[in-house]
Amino acid sequence: MTFSSDYTVPKMIRESSIEYGDLPAQQVRHKDGTFTPVLYREMFQLALDFGAALIKHGVQRQQPVGLIADNCEEWLDASVGIMSIGAFDVPRGCNATADDLQKIISITECKIVVTENASQIKKLIEIKDELPHLETIINIKDDIQPVLDQQLKDKKLNYHSFKNFILEGKDWRLYNPGVVEAELEKGDGSEIATIIFTSGTTGTPKGVMLTHSNFLIQLDECVYRMYMNPGQNCLSVLPVWHVFEREMEYIVLVQGGALCYSK
């Protein structure tokens, strides 16, 4: 399996959505222990909807977008959506401290940050005065209370729920057909896909820029060493913002497997 220099992660996901469209790409766990599948074709369209909403809100190619969340289906939707329009994500987990986030977001000058829950928003509000570039927060869980909503307004931060942001992008695509797909097609392997920061345990966190080709070149050999049949399930355990887990997820997705989120 060899990818050309103009190939990107979203282009790989697109091919999987065509080849394995009616197979589960993700298995989402509910509180009662049951799982609901998200098909490849559904997952890819959700990602494009997210990318469309980003375009509507002014995100440009090679612009950083923060992604502060742990393993969940929305993480992949957001990440692929960000990369689909040529932007790149700056990920970190929910265990990051406010000080960690201040360093990461200020260094990359993110204007938009995706958060998993209200706890992450509270951290961003706490450090907002040190983040002059931060303008917009997109929250995955619908857990915003009136007090927090007022604090967001006081800090002049725009707020969107993830679900509504997806719907906004879906609607935008209806009136702007083909725009997101065209941006995806412009993608090149040499473009930055992500900036992943070190833990900071030995000093200030350092950002590592990784291109699409950095990820895809690993798939040439890894798929033969970690072979999966289409439709097989794979449990996502390690933090997805770690480069190793992220690469493992691409190995699953390029072979038509399903990512199972247990949290």
Image (cartoon, rainbow, N blue to C red):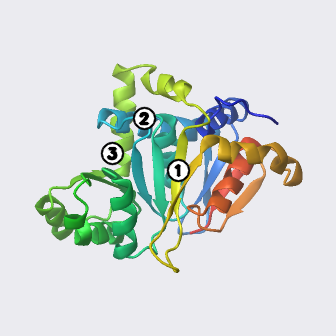
Which residue is disc 3 drawn over?
Answer: 164
**Residue carrying label 1:** 194
Q: Is residue 144 visible?
A: yes
Viewer-side label of 3, 1: 1
Q: Is residue 228 visible?
A: no
Residue 193 lies, in percent from the top left, at 54, 45
Q: CA distance from mark 1 to mark 2?
A: 13 Å
**What amino acid does circle 2 point to?**
Arg
Q: Is residue 195 left or right of residue 221?
A: left
Residue 61, image x and y in percent? 42, 35
* Amino acid on which disc 3 is placed: Asn
Q: Nearer the viewer, residue 17 or 217?
A: 217
Q: Residue furthest right?
A: 224
Q: Residue furthest left?
A: 154
Q: Which mark is residue 203?
A: none
Location of the N terminus by quadrant is: top right
Q: Secondary structure at mark 3?
A: helix
Disc 3 to disc 2, how far (Cα)? 23 Å
Q: Quadrant of residue 41?
A: top right
